[in-house]
Image (cartoon, grey):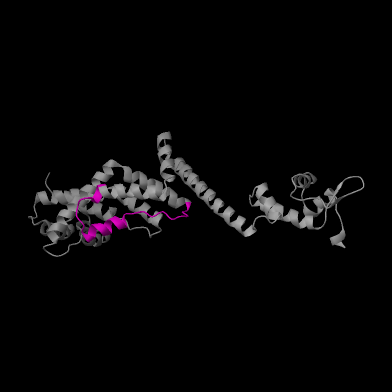
Amino acid sequence: MDGDTLYSIGELARRTGLTVKTVRFYSDRGIVAPTDRSPAGYRLYSIDAVARLDLVRTLRELGLDLPTIRKVVDRELSLPEVAAAHAEALAVQIRVLRLRRAVLTAVAERGSTPEETELMHRLAQLSKDERRRLIDDFLEVAFGGLGAAPAFAGVKRSMTPELPDDPDAEQVQAWVELAEISLDQDFRAVVRGLAEEQAAEQARSDTMGPRRDIAAVVGHQAGPAMAAGIAPASPEADPVVAAFTAHYAQLLGRPDDVELRRRLATRLESVNDPRRERYLQLLAVVNGWPAPESLAPVLDWSVEALRVRTPR
């Protein structure tokens, strides 16, 4: 019977598909011990050695080291516990590989300099707490000291990236670029200026009831005109421009004059900063949100419509 049959190293190798050298290697290290020896002194193994070698091969292919494998096959360690620990270690390795892949992909696509590559690598390696501190610093610069209005609390939440614990390469790459944008001092100044303008408008609105952000109002009013193919400089655009400038004049408590229109055009140009839209696009990728609709076309239309009607 098979259970009583003893096998030489060569026969064991044929049964398991391993090489004689590999079987001898495992035998020399005590992982698969011989049951007996032939009269000539050659090692002989029972059928149990076949199952043991099959398990050893599987565990090696899964990446376990030999000391751990020996403890598993000798039942000194629980296989489920070892598997769980190894799976956790592999998860860490996978995350590191994703980070490296994301950085290398970004470097290849952007033609980055060594300095930019070093920054991207550092940003990709940040811990969850370090990422939070970086974004908190950006949001504090942008919105700090402007009061505790619910609107600002909501804006801060809506601008906070939350990289998942197990992000994919696209999310990692988006996070790195988003972090770079948030460190841009000029962009920080743009966002701060917009927040201060909105805070001043909100302060006036507190006595007149809540008001929508002027960029949203302009987009709502100018969007249909643009979609209808009305050119910014055409007479058909006059009532559209008059409507949103009247709204802005009421919001500020000022007359609808040349200075107000210049101020509104400057405000809309700041809102239309490409870095702001890119930040929101990347934020959606990191957080797994739907891609935001671009406001750039309607803001471009509105700024042009204002400029052609405003004397230099």
Residue closer to the observer: 201 or 246: 201
Whole-percent x, y for residue 196 in the image: 19, 50
Residue closer to the observer: 58 or 212: 58
* Region of the chain picked out in magenta, as a range: 141-168
Q: Residue at x 79, y 45 (%)?
A: 24
Res. 292 image quadrant: bottom left
Furthest residue in direction bottom, as rendered: 209
Report the quarter where the C terminus lies.
Answer: top left
Q: Residue at x 78, y 55 (%)?
A: 49
Whole-percent x, y for residue 37 in the image: 87, 49
Report the quarter where the N terminus lies.
Answer: bottom right
Residue 192 at least partly seen: yes
Q: Is residue 151 magenta?
A: yes
Apparent side of residue 77 relative to residue 201 in the rendered image (left or right) = right
Whole-percent x, y for residue 298 in the image: 26, 55
Q: Residue at x 23, y 53 (%)?
A: 301
Whole-percent x, y for residue 290 in the image: 38, 60
Count of residue discs: 0
Q: Residue at x 28, y 44 (%)?
A: 187
